[in-house]
């Protein structure tokens, strides 16, 4: 498996990652329900196969099925320990501490490798709120100082002025 460095973290990860949206969202890509035992077992088997193939980067989110994806990942990746990088996301409408603590429980972790602010397109007002004193980014930085989070990032599906502000901020 080819590897790369994840941004400025210094973490070495597989070039191919394993995304968790389909594991938590009902009918996301096909007929699927996370509460269906047989389908859940298929996701767990896919996680096991991914580990066996050398995939080391796994990405999920608290919003995927109201934590269902995180719970499945927590179960399927529990034995991988520190041999993987596990990323999750917090929505800008969530309280960071509550979201991170819930993700820690769901993912069966003492610390989250990467927590990303979950977004597709950021409008200026949303960026203002995230970057404001005491805003979501400051909340995540406090959790990082406590050792609950190793690295902080953001997700996006479009480049715009708000995304440029996040990058320029550099925190």
Image (cartoon, grey):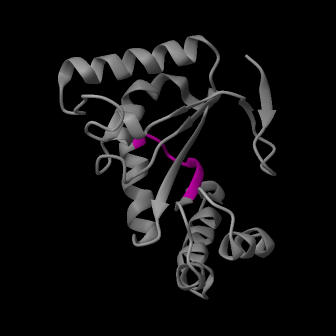
Task: Give left or right: position of 83 versus 31.
Answer: right
Question: Magenta span covers which residues?
Answer: 107-116
Residue nearest the observer in this picture, 12 or 166: 166
Res 141 quadrant in image: bottom right
Q: Position of residue 123 (x, y in %)?
A: 56, 77
Task: Give left or right: position of 22 versus 130.
Answer: left
Q: Quadrant of the C terminus?
A: bottom right
Q: Quadrant of the N terminus?
A: top right
Q: Position of residue 164 (x, y in %)?
A: 75, 71
Q: Position of residue 8 (x, y in %)?
A: 81, 51
Res 70 quadrant in image: top left
Q: Residue at x 62, y 63 (%)?
A: 144
Q: Residue at x 31, y 41 (%)?
A: 25
Residue nearest the observer in this picture, 14 or 144: 14
Q: Residue at x 41, y 25 (%)?
A: 76
Q: Residue at x 76, y 75 (%)?
A: 169
Q: Is residue 96 above or below residue 9?
A: below
Whether 71 is among the magenta residues is no
Q: Is residue 64 above or below residue 91?
A: above
Task: Give left or right: position of 100 versus 30.
Answer: right
Q: Position of residue 45 (x, y in %)?
A: 39, 14
């Amino acid at each position: 498996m080819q590897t790369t460095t994840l941004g400025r973290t210094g973490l070495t990860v597989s070039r191919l990652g394993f995304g968790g949206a389909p594991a938590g969202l009902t009918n996301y890509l096909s007929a699927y329900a996370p509460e269906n035992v047989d389908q859940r077992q298929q996701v767990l088997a896919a996680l096991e196969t991914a580990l066996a193939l050398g995939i080391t980067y796994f990405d999920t989110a608290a919003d995927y099925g109201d934590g269902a994806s995180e719970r499945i990942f927590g179960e399927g990746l529990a034995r991988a320990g520190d041999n993987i990088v596990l990323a999750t996301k917090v929505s800008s409408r969530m309280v960071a501490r509550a979201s991170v603590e819930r993700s820690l429980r769901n993912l069966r972790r003492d610390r989250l490798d990467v927590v990303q602010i979950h977004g597709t397109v950021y409008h200026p007002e949303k960026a203002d709120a995230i970057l404001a004193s005491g805003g979501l980014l400051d909340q995540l930085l406090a959790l990082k100082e406590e050792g609950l989070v190793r690295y902080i990032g953001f997700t996006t599906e479009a480049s715009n002025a708000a995304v440029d502000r996040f990058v320029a901020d550099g925190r």
